[in-house]
Amino acid sequence: MIKSFNSSAEKATSPLLLDIDWDTTLHIVDLIRQGDVNPKAAVQSLTSRLKDTNPNVVLLALQVFESVVKNCGQSVHEQVACRAVMEQVHEVLRTNPNEEVRKKILLLLSTWVYAFRNEAKYRAVQDTVNILKAEGHHLPTVSESDAMFTADRAPDWADGECCHRCRTQFTMLRRKHHCRACGQVFCGDCSSRSSTIPKFGIEREVRVCESCYDDINK
Ligand SMILES: O=P(O)(O)O[C@@H]1[C@H](O)[C@H](OP(=O)(O)O)[C@@H](O)[C@H](O)[C@H]1O
Ligand SMILES: [Zn+2]
Ligand SMILES: [Zn+2]
């Protein structure tokens, strides 16, 4: 699946893009959430794009970073909030002359340092922010809602041998599906609707179960 991930990462950070390709960005989120790609490999692939000489590619890579950190949960947080990645992000800030890139990096670090403020294992973010402040960088203040992604991120997917709603057993023909809003496993009939999920920052219509569809669109 890393091939499909890399082609999606290539597409989402193409220098030809004039705006964020949300479809591909959210497909990358799905691939990581579904466990179709190793989070470490995914983060390494995205980090490598931060060194691109084209500032648009770097900005798009930072946007994908923001989406995967926001929506893929702990498996990605562990890979991003570590010394090695923080040093690479710091290096980009030191060497990339593009003002938009520098602003986006400072905004991301401000969001992450707030969101991870109570998690000692992610202290590499706080350490990096302390260094940046000592170097005279001004980090923007982040609103609580911007950094609340660790509280309201999409839930990890549950597994099960029968539909969470109608209890029908899954078979070769009655396949499993997951609701992106509650993370539960459903049959096709109980998860035939799709919806955006604004509270998780999912702007594209994704598969949701009947009750989550009603909750979101009531
Ligand atoms: O169709 P399969 O080969 O069984 O694979 C299932 C699909 O990938 C489902 O995607 P979907 O939720 O978008 O349908 C996913 O939710 C299930 O976990 C997978 O088992
Ligand atoms: Zn069902
Ligand atoms: Zn649901």
Image (cartoon, rainbow, N blue to C red):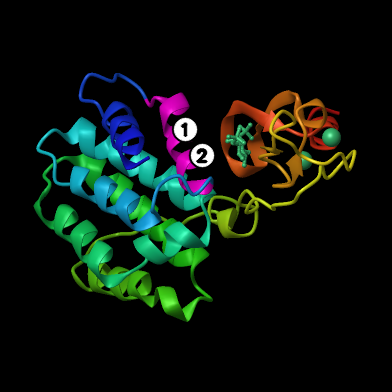
How far is mark 1 from mark 2, CA to CA? 5 Å
Pick the quarter of the image with the N terminus: top left
Q: What residue type is labelled 2?
A: Asp
Identity of the residue drawn at 82% across and 41% down: 169
Identity of the residue drawn at 74% across and 36% down: 171
Q: Give 198 or 169, whichever is nearer the viewer.
A: 169
Main SS, magenta residues: helix
Is residue 159 rendered to the left or right of residue 14? right
Q: Kindly state the secondary structure of the residue where label 2 is placed.
A: helix
In the rendered image, residue 215, in percent from the top left (x then y), is placed at 83, 36
Q: Quadrant location of residue 173? A: top right
Identity of the residue drawn at 39% across and 24% down: 21
Q: Which residue lies furthest to the right in this view?
A: 166
Which residue has dot 2 on it? Answer: 30
Which residue has dot 1 on it? Answer: 27
* Badge 2 density bin: few <14, some 14–19, many ≥20, Cα 10 Å: some
Magenta segment boundaries in residue numbering: 20-33
* Badge 1 density bin: few <14, some 14–19, many ≥20, Cα 10 Å: some
Q: Give 10 or 134, whichever is nearer the viewer.
A: 10
Is the residue at mark 2 in contact range of ligand 1, meaning its CB lies under 8 Å from it?
A: yes
**Relative to residue 97, is residue 119 depicted above or below?**
below
Is the residue at mark 1 in contact range of ligand 1, meaning its CB lies under 8 Å from it?
A: no
Mark 1 touching mark 2, by CB under 8 A? Answer: yes
In the rendered image, residue 194, in percent from the top left (x then y), is placed at 70, 25
